Image (cartoon, helix red, strand yellow):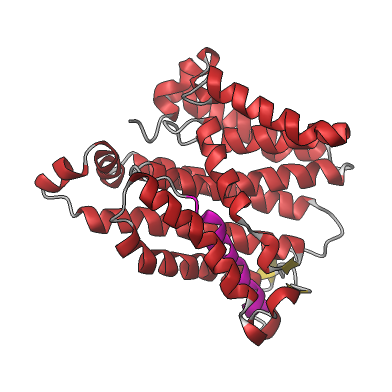
Amino acid sequence: MRRFAVIAVACAAVYFLAIPFAFRGSPYILSVLTNAAIAAVISSGVWLTFAIGRINIAQGAFCMIGGYATAVLTTRYGVPFWICLPLSGLAAAAFGALIGWPLLRLKGVYFSMISLSLTEAVRLAFLNGGKLTNEASGIVGIPGPGAVSIAGIELIPAFDGSSPLPFYYLSALLLAGTLLALWRIMNCRIGWVFRSLRLNEELASSMGVNVAAYRVLAFSLSSFIGGVGGSFYAVYQQNIYPASYTVTDSMNYMLYCFLGGLDYVLGALVGAFTLVLSFELLHALQTYQTLIYAGIMILAMLLLPNGIISFPMFHGGRAASRGGGR
């Protein structure tokens, strides 16, 4: 545990200090890292549903809900982003709890197929949302985060768009906070209950566990994380459209978890950064980019079926980083 803490502090120092200093003059690299960090945040929510034994392919729907909630609140009602961020997560979580109660009774491929359809259903709902969502035109001109002051002291400056660093740091803080929260959840009683649901729901029920309530809790937390990620993206891109999130996005968030490793809290982070950065590095190949990208992903899954973190070089930190063991 102590070794893991030292490694975590070292990685945080590199990510918060060394990288911004080294690439302060490279907006493109900082933007790619920002996208990878938020993709990791959103995928971490999907990872949480894996912890209860469900394959969630609906995260794009909750990102869309969070993004549109922020877009509507900021552009039409003038609500500050810092309030919209948690509110968007709560809106997505409320929707997740509402539909999760009946849907989570399904298992295996049945739940997966319904969750896959959910992304498209939500997309169509926003596409036909009338004046509220501007239909296919979407919502543009979303204002950036404003300054935060207490007693006349400016704690957080306004994001004026002149530098990618503020969004880079915000994405890094969201990622760190999400991973810390998931690690804490998976190492307390709730986490042990989640793992018991993944192993055997009938046995957990016989021990007095309210299976339905815990399933909905996990799905709601996953939806909350997706809503927060969608809120960030909407402000970061300054727009959102019904086509901003598709079934492909939901599948990618799931694949990040598989590639990184389902047994580890850091699995979604490793998978997201590996695939997002790989895709950008292959950009120069143009025609063959997608083909090589898919080949790398398939090869990694064949050689490391338990994820990249299962590679022998990572075994030294196995016990400390494991959060959702089978």
Principal secondary structure, stretch drawn in magenta? helix
Query: What is the quadrant of the C terminus in the image?
Result: top left
Q: Residue furthest top?
A: 312
Q: Position of residue 169 (x, y in %)?
A: 69, 49
Q: Is residue 55 left or right of residue 211?
A: right
Residue 155 seen by the camera = no
Q: Position of residue 210 (x, y in %)?
A: 18, 55
Q: Give the magenta range.
A: 57-74
Q: In the image, is residue 312 above or below residue 277?
A: above
Question: Image quadrant of residue 1?
Answer: top left
Q: Does 10 appear in magenta? A: no
- The residue located at (27%, 40%) in the rendering is 192
Q: Is residue 169 left or right of residue 323?
A: right
Question: Image quadrant of residue 301?
Answer: top right
Q: In the image, is residue 52 above or below residue 226?
A: above
Q: Position of residue 4 (x, y in %)?
A: 48, 25
Q: Position of residue 87 (x, y in %)?
A: 52, 71
Q: Nearer the viewer, residue 187 or 104?
A: 104
Residue 144 seen by the camera = yes
- The residue located at (68%, 26%) in the rendering is 295
- The residue located at (59%, 64%) in the rendering is 64
